[in-house]
Amino acid sequence: MRLLRLSLLINYFSITKNVKKAVTAINIGIFLSIFAASSAVISLYIENEISDLEYELASLSESKRYQERSSTEIPRLVSDFHRYMDIDKIYNDFTEILKLTNFGNRAISNEDRFIPFLYDIDDVLELEGLLTDDIIAELKDLINEYPEYTKKKYLQILDDFPKIIKTVIPKNEIKKYRNILFDSSYQDLLDEINNKENQLMYDGKLYKYYEESYKLFDYAIEFINMMDSISLYVIEIHKQTIDELNDAIIKKSLLEKNLVLIIFVLQFFVFLIVQFFEVSSINFNSMIKKRIK
Amino acid sequence: MRRGKLSNKSLIFIILTATFTLLSYASDQMVIRSEDKLRNTKIQFENKKNKNTEYETLSSKFTSISTNIDLKLQSYLSKRNFLIKSIILLDDEIEKTSKNSTKIFSESLGKGVEATRTFKWQIITELTDIVLFIDAMTVDFADIYIYQEELIKENNQNKIKKLKNLFFYDENMKEVTSDLESKLFYKDMSIYTDIYNLDTLTIEQTRTYRDWILENFTTKNFYDIYKYKMFLLERLYKDTNKLDKFTEILDENLLMIEDEMEDILKIIQKININKNYFILSSILFQVLSLLFLLILFKSFLITPKKTYKKILTI
């Protein structure tokens, strides 16, 4: 590595002609390194900002994906509710026609008709603890963005929630009905056949429970549909925010590019001025040296 | 060899160059460490993501089984007593003592077609249908259970007892049916299980046996078939509830995994930001080190030994 020895370098620099060349080369190097340093600082600052935006974007995308996944479940849930109610409607038609005959009237009791609709009603009541005050406030904020008619309708659904989602049938009664449903003895069946009061279709406690439970099912479907609509609205908000964030990231990236370019032009200008003065100073120095000699 | 004495200024430039070179090296090391940390965290995130998908698939499959059973139950339970009550109503002894005549069925329905026989045939068919449906559910559940046993056990942690045996009624049948048998008129269950049991009878024998049932079973036998049917439906209902409870546990754990994934995502983002910061810092330090080296060289070249004023006055 003899070529790199400092003495050789100093010898090379001791020649005035070489000094001029070396100073120009060093100045170009300094200019480039200052430019690189300032570009790095700009990148550091803007990349940090972009990283924050990207983090927000990643969180929002994740949230949007979650909302979309939940949203695809809702139609299935509504469809299950409808199928459940359709089965009841078909059976209701079948019962109504059969009850017009003496045979059918005795073969189908109130228990037969209504208990299958009520025995599992406590499952729907699990919705009761779903809406906390915070969630209601958040939902109301979103609903307020809807057109007037839909807004009124959804606010009404929200207000009705505690009135409708409540215990329609006492728990011990539900237990009793489950017992009747699955464990009727031969005597129970005979009693039902022979009990004329039990054969009245639209009367009695069971019919009342059935009506209230039916309202609860109807309401549950409306409520789920409202949640579906709100969920789609939230997805749309997420989509817009994601687009805005993407735009902001592109703008930041463009700003970084422009800033680097401006810095380059400015520093190049400064470099030219410095270069001019330094070359003049070397010329002046060599002139003095010549005069001394 | 002659050596020039370094000025204070040059010394400062050398120290600055060395410091920035060291800082650049340290930043490079931090980038390597960040990359290592990022890789491990990404692996952790991917594992959670896979787990999340597994949980979602399992939950969705169990919900599908549960919904299928719910709808089937709704359909069977709605008309659960109609056939047996019809048979009871058409029973000769009751018919004779009843003031309300139930002879409302046409007596010319066709050869071999008769109301009581039709109801009896339907009650047999209904039991067979329920058993076949339960068999199908058993297979569906068992298929999922076998492939996801570890995951199911990990989530269940014995909170729901005998989860493995859901919808599976052959095992411990004696234990399960003892309560039912006490409620039957005829305690020998085999006369009812043979209605559908293709393991003990051929298809032809089953058909003959069913014809024999239609001729020889009394109303009380049909009540036993009805009780057996209701017993199966109740087991189905209870097992579905157990499955729903397990799905709830699964969904709760799924939410926990989603929270964990969000936390890991935050960590990944933080590591990424730090990594970028270290890369840019390393570049900046390298550039600064180079800058001070160049300034050092320049100081060697243009530092005057005397001031110009002094030179000019000579």
Image (cartoon, rainbow, N blue to C red):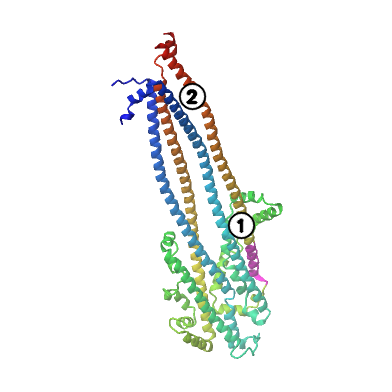
Does the magenta-highlighted stretch encompass residue A7?
no
Pick the residue in front: A136 or B27: B27
Is B24 located above or below residue A220 in the figure? above
Q: Earlier in the sequence, mark 1 or mark 2?
A: 1
Q: Main secondary structure of the magenta part?
A: helix
Calculate the distance from the C-alpha at mark 1 to the C-alpha at mark 2: 69 Å
Q: Amino acid at mark 2?
A: Gln
Q: Residue furthest right?
A: A149
Left or right placement of residue A160 versus residue B304 in this view? right
> Is the residue A14 above or below the residue A166 in the image?
above
Residue A228 is marked as: 1
Please give the residue where the numbered disc 2 appears in the rendered image.
A275
Q: Which residues are magenta?
A: A202-218
Query: Compared to A100, does B137 lie above or below?
Result: above
Badge 2: residue crowd in 10 Å (few <14, some 14–19, many ≥20): some
The chain letter for the residue carrying disc 1 is A
Could one spot residue B266 in this view of the protein?
A: yes
Are the residues under badges 1 and 2 in a single subunit? yes
Q: Chain of mark 2?
A: A
Dividing the picture into quarters, in which one does residue A165 lie?
bottom right
**Foreground residue among B278 and A272:** A272
Q: Position of residue B186 (x, y in %)?
A: 48, 83
Q: Quadrant of the C terminus of chain A?
A: top left
Element under disc 1: helix
Looking at this view, is B42 or B205 the one in front?
Answer: B42
Q: Residue B109: x, y in percent?
A: 63, 88
Secondary structure of residue under mark 2? helix
